[in-house]
Image: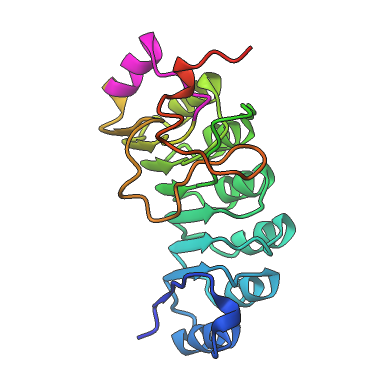
């Protein structure tokens, strides 16, 4: 009992009559140190993550989604108390590459990582920090989801080099990636389940609406093409 805690919600916290933090703490207490899997969405913060870390050394699955109040410092301190982690998700959280590096250093067993974020078609901002942190610290990964990430082809190549066991890779809405030539061939040969930047998002659990850098949504009927088909001058 209480080894799995799933606190999925739709983010309407102000309309709730329940104190989710209090409920979560109570569930963690009832697990009596045997918690193996927890999912926290929207209400996660430093205090609740520390509470879990101090009482759940057997955790194998940690999912944090839309938890913008969790800091790098507390995540890094907490992740060190989860040496058995095999599945990690840090989607739509305000965390830096240092947190990813800490996951790799502190947890030698992670087989699955989900690091999802908002996808943008423009402006094109290139950043390979996440990709390098993953490539250098998570060599045992089998499954990787990077929805909406800003990595480039060089970041993707680093992941392919650093994660030799990778079998599943989701690059949807990673519009800095141009899968062509040898890179595309290498991905197709290595990855059994490959999702490309412009693949359908119909089965994606979060809001996949594309936005520009100012927060405006893009109409797919007006912008039907991938960035590879548009020349920006």
Residue at 49%, 25% in the rendered image: 156
Is residue 161 on the magenta stretch? no
Q: Which residues fall within the magenta stretch?
A: 175-188
Residue at 62%, 43% in the rendered image: 101
Q: Quadrant of the C terminus?
A: top right
Percent position (x, y) of residue 70? 67, 63
Work out whether residue 30 or residue 92 is closer to the camera in this orientation and state it: 92
Please state if 77 lies on the left or on the right of 81 as rendered.
right
Work out whether residue 6 or residue 33 is closer to the camera in this orientation and state it: 6
Percent position (x, y) of residue 144? 41, 41
Percent position (x, y) of residue 4? 39, 75
Indicate whether 2 appears above or below 81.
below
Please state if 177 lies on the left or on the right of 170 as rendered.
right
Residue at 25%, 32% in the rendered image: 192
Q: How is the image coloured?
A: rainbow
Work out whether residue 116 or residue 158 is closer to the camera in this orientation and state it: 116
Percent position (x, y) of residue 161? 46, 23
Total numbered labels:
0
């Amino acid at each position: 009992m209480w080894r799995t805690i799933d606190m999925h919600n739709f983010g309407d916290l102000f309309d709730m009559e329940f104190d989710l933090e209090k409920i979560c703490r109570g569930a963690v207490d009832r697990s009596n140190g045997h918690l193996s899997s927890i999912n926290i969405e929207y209400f996660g913060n430093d205090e609740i993550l520390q509470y879990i870390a101090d009482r759940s050394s057997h955790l194998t699955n940690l999912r944090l989604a839309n938890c913008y109040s969790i800091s790098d410092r507390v995540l890094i301190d907490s992740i060190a108390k989860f040496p058995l982690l095999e599945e990690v998700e840090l989607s739509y959280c305000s965390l830096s590459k240092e947190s990813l590096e800490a996951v790799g250093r502190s947890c030698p067993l992670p087989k699955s990582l989900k690091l999802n974020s908002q996808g943008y078609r423009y402006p094109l901002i290139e950043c390979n920090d996440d990709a390098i942190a993953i490539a250098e610290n998570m060599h045992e990964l089998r499954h990787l989801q990077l929805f909406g990430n800003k990595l480039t082809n060089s970041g993707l190549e680093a992941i392919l080099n650093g994660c030799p066991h990778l079998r599943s890779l989701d690059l949807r809405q990673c519009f800095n990636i141009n899968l062509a030539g040898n890179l595309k061939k290498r991905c197709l040969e290595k990855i059994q389940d490959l999702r490309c930047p412009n693949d359908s998002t119909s089965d994606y659990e979060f809001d996949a609406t594309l936005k520009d850098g100012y927060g405006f949504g893009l109409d797919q009927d007006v912008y039907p093409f991938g960035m590879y088909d548009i020349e920006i001058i």
